[in-house]
Amino acid sequence: MADIQQLFQLGQQMQGRLQQLQSELAGRLVEASAGGGLVKVSVDGRGMLRSLTIDPEAFAGRDAELLSDLVIGAVAEAQRQAADLVQAEMKKVQPLSFPQIL
């Protein structure tokens, strides 16, 4: 019965570590830009958009479709970087060693 209790405790420890990591990532920002810096975005470690800045120069002589593409490109890049950040942080979480049950 002690082995099941140990597994339960290890599971709770891992869940606690993952929750802590999610909280930490929510507070970290990743920035990306498109169009030579005309469009800049920030996303948090969960990939949620936190800020969007469009340089007024982005409107000069450009159509709305191009501006839309720049925004989408910057957001997609920032979200990709946030996903990479999550993967890197997850690799740092030490794997738990489970006791032998037999």
Image (cartoon, rainbow, N blue to C red):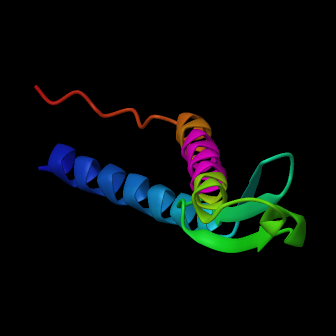
Give above or below for 92 relative to 58: above
Residue at 84 percent across and 65 percent down: it is 60
Q: Quadrant of residue 58?
A: bottom right
Give above or below for 78 relative to 28: above
Q: Residue furthest front?
A: 61
**Does residue 32 appear to the left or right of 18 in the view shown?**
right
Give above or below for 55 relative to 73: below
Q: Quadrant of the C terminus?
A: top left
Residue at 87 percent across and 72 percent down: it is 56
Q: Main secondary structure of the magenta part?
A: helix
Question: Where residue 28 appears, x then y in whole percent?
Answer: 71, 63
Instruction: Inspect the magenta stretch and tell me whether residue 30 lies in it.
Output: no
Question: Where residue 71 appears, x then y in whole percent?
Answer: 64, 59
Question: Where residue 1 appears, x then y in whole percent?
Answer: 11, 50
Instruction: Inspect the magenta stretch and tell me whether residue 83 lies in it.
Output: yes
The span shown in magenta is: 72-85
Residue at 64 percent across and 44 percent down: it is 81
Please tell me which residue lies in front, 14 or 62.
Answer: 62
Give above or below for 25 relative to 4: below
Please tell me which residue lies in front, 11 or 33.
Answer: 33
